[in-house]
Image (cartoon, rainbow, N blue to C red):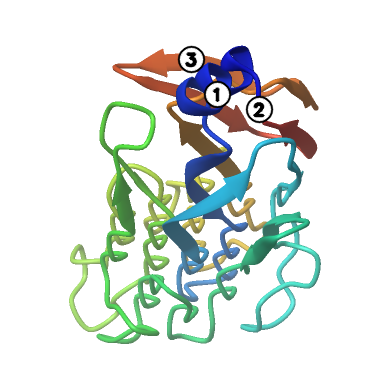
Amino acid sequence: MSLIGIIASQNYPRTVSLEYLVVGGGGVGGPNSRGGGAGAEARTATQAIAIGTTLTITVAGATTSWGSNLARTGASSQITGSGFTTVTSIAGQNGGDPAGGTGQNGGGSGGASPTGGLGSQPGVAGTASSITGSSFTYASGGGGGGLNNPGNPGRDNPGGAGGTDSGGAGGSYPSTNPIAGGTNTGGGSGGCQEGNNTTVNGGSGVVIVRATVQAASTTGSPTATTSGAYYIYKFTGSGSITY
């Protein structure tokens, strides 16, 4: 090997240590005093990849319909690539009757029940990450929907608060509507108050990667930022990244 080749091999890494956050789509809170939607899966870890590797990024869209308390098809986020162990984060479940949806981070229960799926009213906090350089809690559960309390006039059960940062609050009887899960956070939406059958969206997902090496190219228009020694790429839609 030439002297130039030796210097190049010493100064330029052949692998990249890639940190990632992969968040699926949040669940939808149920209608008519049902539970809040669960937060999605949110997976964080580090993998070493070879220089020249292209990773394909898939980002879950918002979960838009409620039909059962099962996880919705097509609301997963994913990273795949040659030599890379695939990472998939699925959606949180939709809010049940009256329990909240289950998932990595449970949604709040509906106003008629004191317990929810893996959580309770209010919705539980999700997964805190500082991958962007500042802390944010992704994939929190939504709060349960409020209920009229006929046994105690004037003491109606309010909707539950959403989980930290990303979960939507539940609607309160009779007129406060539920809040959608946070966009590109994987948060579950709040359950509807009694008498309201119009549900709101669970939060869309997100994929964020960072390394101390700048990417050679990207597709899908991720937001590129830096923090300290890290080059950070935030995907709010599907695309790819090559190192």
Figure check: 76 above or below 138: below
**Left or right of residue 53, residue 187 in this image:** left
Q: Position of residue 156 (x, y in %)?
A: 26, 66
Identify residue for label 1.
6
- Which amino acid, mark 2? Met
Q: Residue at x 74, y 77 (%)?
A: 67
Q: Position of residue 5 (x, y in %)?
A: 63, 20
What is the crowding at mark 3: few (fewer than 14 residues within 10 Å), some, or many (at least 20)?
A: few
- Which amino acid, mark 1? Ile
Q: Residue at x 27, y 71 (%)?
A: 121
- Which amino acid, mark 3? Thr
Locate the C terminus and report the quarter of the image it occupies. top right
Front position in the image: 62 or 8:
8
Q: CA distance from mark 1 to mark 3?
A: 32 Å
Name the disc covering residue 82, or none: none
Name the disc covering residue 225, or none: 3
Q: CA distance from mark 2 to mark 1?
A: 6 Å
- The local secondary structure at tag 3 comes to strand
Residues under numbered marks 2 and 1 in contact, where contact means CB atoms less than 8 Å apart: yes
Identify residue for label 2.
1
**Left or right of residue 216, residue 121 in this image:** left
Q: Could you tell which of marks 3 and 2 lies nearer the N-terminus? A: 2
Q: Nearer the viewer, mark 1 or mark 3?
A: 1
Q: Residue at x 39, y 68 (%)?
A: 144
Residues under numbered marks 1 and 3 in contact, where contact means CB atoms less than 8 Å apart: no
